[in-house]
Image (spheres, grey):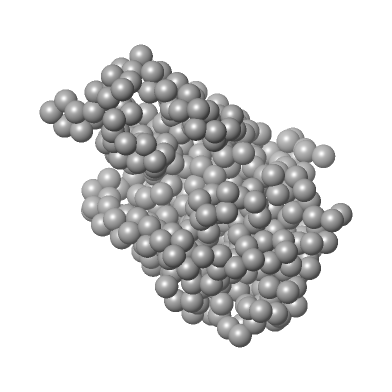
Amino acid sequence: MENIERLHREARSCARWLQGLDEVEIVSHIDADGLSTCGVLVQALRREGIAARIRFVRNGGEALGGPPDLPRVFAELGSGRLDDVQRLPCPTLVVDHHPTVGRVDRAGPHRVFNPRLLGFDGTQEISGSGTAYLIARALDAANADLAALAIVGAVGDRQDRRHGRLIGLNRTIVEEGSRAGVLEARVDLHLFGRQTRPLIRLLEATGLDPGFLHDLDIPVKNGHWLRWGDLAGEERMRLASGLVQWSLATGQGAEAAQRLLAEGYTLPREPEGTPFRDASEYASLLNATARYGEGQVGLDLCLGDRDGAYRRARTLLGRHRKNISAGLALVHDQGLEERSHFSYFCAEDRIRDTILGIITGMALERETGAEKPLVAFARAPEGLKVSARATPAHTQRGLDLGPALMRAAHAVGGDGGGHDIAGGATIPPGAMEEFLDHLDREIGVQMAG
Ligand SMILES: [Mn+2]
């Protein structure tokens, strides 16, 4: 049962816990949501005069290391290893939305703030950054401006995808951000790059050529290549309905057509024509930083640097995009292997482990038509990295990737977990075949039940 009053009470209690400190160490996860979580926390803490040291980590295991001389805040991780976290000699606060493993110790010096523990859906309704935002708001109502960054994290976690809009606690954050003048939500063409990409590039993602725009009498150039935001309202309507009709006419189904139109989130205080103005593009820019070992660049963006950090991030984004298309090409050329309940591929060292999840998600849509969940492997410093992605249709048939990955990983001496539609694991280098057997059995049991 969702318990909103208790959630806010716990947020206030965490706020008081933080207010009693002079300095904390924040260990931050390295995806867009992790960085946004960290960004919300750092800004809220600075406004309270609390200093924050930051460490970027790849997983919960790394977050457990480090010197225990400061109270430690876990930003968007830690839930999967509560017993280990609560054994640390320093006081800790876990701010997270991932499924919890282990018991919450309410007597000791440790705090766990995770909306899942109060019945909220951490996969669809609230992200790590949204969870951090609840604490920021409890610290000071003036922190409502941080709603914009909270929504960047939610969109980074693709929490808007299942319903075509953000729902639940995220919806409340959108409303608070709108009232604070930092967010606008409106139904829009759902193609990536609305703020920054020329229309003809935007269309490439659908497989259409520029002739399509010509047929609809949509201008593509006016001194410079026109972007979506440059079109008049009536032209946008014409293009959007043209795309929906095309989608239906080519037999992609009503669902695909509907996906073309979805709610988008604009950050009106950010400069036009920059990725910061669109939550989805902003999240992508963040992903291009910390996943390549440059977490500080991403955090600086979250803290408002639109100068040096932005220049660096643009270079990183170029590389990130190349890596993603190379990764997708690899999956396409190599093809997928089949198990009873999922497809899989092993990239060895040809896909960087930190972007394996992104590529797996995109390949799921492109390669399989999403008939089965997709599992991917790549070499990582600590073993073999596993990423798995599924669709809402799979979860409706009983699939829950997080627990399946955790059990299969534990069976081969690794560790894993995650959400129902997205999860990961790390296993010993030689354990792939054995892991595949376990995972097939686990998912088979879920889908049968
Ligand atoms: Mn997240």
As drawn, is 224 to the left or to the right of 409?
Answer: left
337, above or below 194, in the image:
below
Whether residue 312 is visible here, answered yes or no, is: no
Q: Position of residue 348 (x, y in %)?
A: 48, 76
Q: Nearer the viewer, residue 265 or 175?
A: 265
In the displayed image of the protein, which residue is found farthest to the top? Answer: 234
Report the residue at 54% width, 49% height from top.
365
In the displayed image of the protein, which residue is found farthest to the left? Answer: 223
User: In the rendered image, which quarter contains the N terminus?
Assistant: top right
Report the residue at 37% width, 29% height from top.
268
In the displayed image of the protein, which residue is found farthest to the front? Answer: 250
Hey, which quadrant is residue 159 in on the image? top right
User: In the rendered image, which quarter contains the C terminus?
Assistant: bottom right
162, above or below 335, in the image:
above
In the displayed image of the protein, which residue is found farthest to the right? Answer: 449
Q: Nearer the viewer, residue 318 or 392?
A: 392
Whether residue 159 is visible here, answered yes or no, is: yes
Hey, which quadrant is residue 196 in on the image? top left
